[in-house]
Image (cartoon, rainbow, N blue to C red):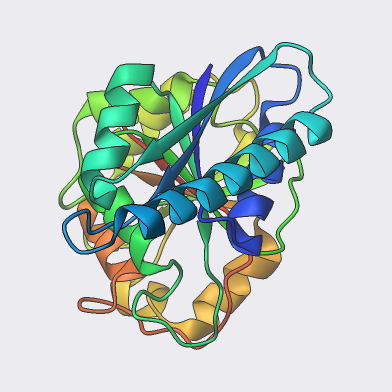
Amino acid sequence: MNVLILTDFSEVSENAGRYALDFLGETPSTISLLNIQDMNLNVESSEKLGTKMLLISEKMHTAIENLKTYSTNPQHKFHLNLSIDNLITAVRRCVEEKKIDLIFIGAASQKVRKHPLLGNHAYEIIQKVKCNILAVPNKVEFINPKRMILPIDYSVLSERKSFQVLRDRNYVKGESLTVLNVNEKENYSLNRKMIQELWESDSEENMDFTSLNKNAFFNTDFLLEIQEKYDIIIILGKNLSISDKLLHSRYGLCSKISNKLPILILHD
């Protein structure tokens, strides 16, 4: 697996790196560590730039050595990547050149934020980079997820190919999957059958289907509830209404609670 870890050398991004290695476990992986620097080459003196680059280089090597020390898998290979492009350009380029399968990014968990469950950078990447992304809240340690929740708005997502990602057990691994229809007016019996087939479950007990009014889903009380009941939130990349209303304050909830659940965005 080819993995990209974004770092700004903060505690949040360092935690995301450790989470990534625990997530990968025994999977042979090529891991690219990417740091993005905002540099004004026309303004800063060559001496200042040289000093800055030396400091960044030291931090990058320290970060990669910390990951190597933390990893218990000799089949983990590590690469350093430094970019002075803007965030999205840098990430897209790395995804294309390194053929990245999964991006790990730290999700800040401050009590008040512009985006309710994610930091600004994490949300921007989710919206603009078509790659599987796992946003890891600060201080959250990896556990094998047993209880997964997949909120879906069937009014805007009904194509079979949108659910093909559920077949990939590299990402969707757990003992139970709750499919939550957040638009209770939609008839989703066909979608239920489709997901059951794709999930290839031997027991219906491993899947649960429920529906909820949109307003009931996008509120603080329900976010607190799902954090007690589940281990991870899964969102299908094409289901933009979910990510907008759950993660973006312009359309949805300005939460004052700290999120403690990893959020996995899957693209087909």
Q: Residue at (64%, 36%) from the top-left corner?
A: 206
Q: Vertically, is 248 above or below 151?
A: below
Q: Position of residue 235 (x, y in %)?
A: 39, 47
| Residue 261 in view here | no
User: The C terminus appears in which quarter of the rendering?
Assistant: top left
The answer to whether residue 197 is left or right of residue 109 is: left
- Answer with the quarter of the image where residue 137 lies: bottom right
Q: Vertically, is 139 above or below 130?
A: below
Say which of 263 and 189 sits in front. 263
Q: Residue at (20%, 64%) from the top-left corner?
A: 43
The answer to whether residue 180 is left or right of residue 95 is: right
The answer to whether residue 21 is left or right of residue 50 is: right
Say which of 143 and 229 sits in front. 143
Q: Vertically, is 185 above or below 198?
A: below
Say which of 108 and 221 sits in front. 108
Q: Position of residue 84 (x, y in %)?
A: 29, 46
Q: Residue at (55%, 32%) from the top-left corner?
A: 172
| Residue 223 in view here | yes
Q: Residue at (55%, 83%) from the top-left corner?
A: 257
Q: Position of residue 99 (x, y in %)?
A: 36, 17
The answer to whether residue 78 is left or right of residue 5 is: right
- Answer with the quarter of the image where residue 182 lies: bottom left
